[in-house]
Amino acid sequence: MPVLRSRLDPRSDTYRANRTAQLAALAALHEQLDLARAGGGERYVERHRARGRLTARQRIELLLDRDAPFLELSSLAAWGTEFTVGAGMVTGIGPVSGVECVLIANDPTVRGGSVNPYSLRKNLRALEIARRNRLPVVNLVESGGADLPTQAELFVPGGRVFHDLTELSALGIPTVALVFGNSTAGGAYIPGLCDHAVLVAGRAKVFLGGPPLVRMATGEEADDEELGGAAMHARVSGLADHYAADEYDCLRIGRRIVADLNWRKHGPGPSRPPDEPLYDVDEVLGLVPTDLRVPFDPREVLARVVDGSRFDEYKSEYGAALVTGWASVHGFPVGVLANARGVLFGEESRKAAEFIQLANRSHTPLLFLQNTTGYMVGTAYEQGGIVKDGAKMINAVTNSTVPHLTLNIGASFGAGNYGMSGRAFDPRLLFAWPTAKLAVMGAAQLAGVLSIVGRQAATARGIAFDEDVDELRRGAIEAQIERESHAFFVTARLYDDGVIDPRDTRTVLGIALSAAHSAPVAGTTGYGVFRM
Ligand code: COA
């Protein structure tokens, strides 16, 4: 297979400037990740430890295989909102007893581990990832149930957690609940809805209503151990399948349950040599221009990410603004679609639609590297049928059934986001680099469009157009869109599965591909009607 040759000059001023900007963005990312890791803050973490309890992250670490990688998801959920960064929940993919599982852990140091609108979305996304990729789920439970002040936003959509857990069970995807502490109200159903439940002696408290609620409802003076303690559930109600002596025992039993699943992946294993790329991955930091309007060659990214820097390009001379071709990552074959020049023209769209069909014929997963400002506008392109061509690409992306992985490395604007398998197109996993931006269009363009519309409206009404007010409004809108396009803003709302260090791209894609191959990998032969 042909090998990519890099033309990057790490001594150039551009490279240095790009790298400096990327490192600054990474420093900001690490600052926020530290906040997420700090959970509810020192006071609550100390109180939790003083009670002899492990933190959510310690529980995860002990549950995972020793020194195993853990792909944390949605780490910055709720960033910039009234809720703690990370949303009081830790989710991710990692191996337990050699089986890749989705782990979902409440962080009891954040408002008693209660579930807020962002942790709910994080929980639901983790369950969706489990369903689509056929990954067993382990819930590490200690939660005060719904975050009561935000119940109006939670109650109705929260039922979906109940729905999804039971649906997973019917799909033959195992679900496990390890209950370390309080599991009140909605939380109480988690061990009830999972295939397997382990409760920690003296710690796990599982009840629909705690003693105060019972007193309110029926007047009964109930003792919390009798009402929902682990011993009661192990000996009387039968909700607990296993009665764990302590947290460590609970984690040990959890590992044993997963080992006893006799789990088999249904997708093929890696089939290509997984050799490292020829170029240093660290150099990806110098690739992304500080001005996103300046295009960059995604082959330079591929040269630092794919096995042996091997890339068999497809239609290299045609539709050159979109690079397509075959490669492998950690031995898993992938078809790559990568924007090379921002805009998608008709040729690019048709090339993409054709390439996606080929990948489906060969049952090859697809990797989308997004750096697009959308489909080309203008009279010549409209007359040339850009709407039909974009629709062909979107049709192919929608109906493709091989796993899609999407990474926003630059910009993801307009319908280009859809054509390049954005969030609404159900990629198995979707990540962004810290300098990446996502919006309906660039901030300056959007502010400019509104200004033109305002000017036209004034003319139509025969009133004077106030240039000064327009200038101020334009600046304010530009600042707003700039803020809303930021990678943290996007990931906070679960529009992706996380912001990653560009240097981790190969590792993240490797874990994601391995996880995706837990489900059968099969292309489709059926699409909708292609507009010709
Ligand atoms: N919604 C919103 N905030 C909650 C909450 C909930 N369900 N549960 C706890 N919190 C808040 C507390 O108000 C407290 O806030 P503060 O530190 O600002 O005072 C913080 O989380 C820690 O709670 P605390 O009670 O001190 O922690 P704890 O570890 O001793 O006990 C619980 C944790 C979950 C056992 C206990 O808080 C509790 O019983 N909460 C109510 C559970 C409930 O009835 N839920 C019904 C859901 S439908």
Image (tube, rainbow, N blue to C red):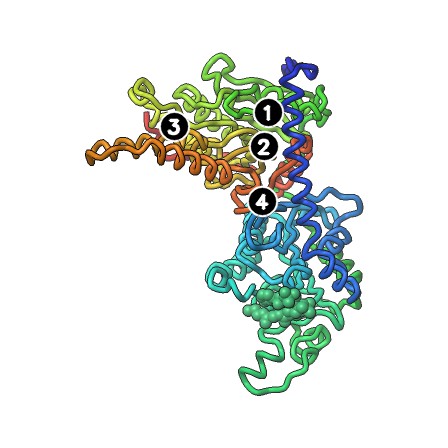
**From the viewer's perspective, is 88 left or right of 167?**
right
Q: In the rendered image of this protein, does residue 381 appear above or below residue 63?
A: above
For residue 328, the mark is none
Please tell me which residue is depicted at 63% across the width and 34% down the height of the picture: 25
The nearer-to-camera label among 3 and 4 is 3
| Crowdedness near tag 4: few (<14), some (14–19) or many (≥20) residues, C-alpha within 10 Å | many
- Type of the residue with mark 4: Asn
Q: Secondary structure at mark 4?
A: helix
For residue 390, the mark is 3
Indicate the position of residue 142 as horizontal and vertical percent values.
Answer: 67, 63
User: Upstream in the sequence, badge 2 or badge 1?
Assistant: 1
Contact? badges 2 and 1 (CB < 8 Å): yes
Indicate the position of residue 392 as horizontal and vertical percent values.
Answer: 38, 29
- Type of the residue with mark 2: Thr
Q: CA distance from mark 2 to mark 4?
A: 28 Å
The nearer-to-camera label among 2 and 3 is 2
Contact? badges 2 and 3 (CB < 8 Å): no
User: Upstream in the sequence, badge 2 or badge 4?
Assistant: 4
Residue under label 4? 133
Q: Secondary structure at mark 2?
A: loop
User: Upstream in the sequence, badge 3 or badge 1?
Assistant: 1
User: Upstream in the sequence, badge 3 or badge 4?
Assistant: 4
Q: CA distance from mark 3 to mark 1?
A: 26 Å
**From the viewer's perspective, is 46 left or right of 384?**
right
Residue under label 1? 288
Q: Secondary structure at mark 1?
A: loop
Q: In this orientation, which residue lies closer to the viewer: 73 or 43?
A: 43
Contact? badges 3 and 1 (CB < 8 Å): no
Q: CA distance from mark 2 to mark 1?
A: 8 Å
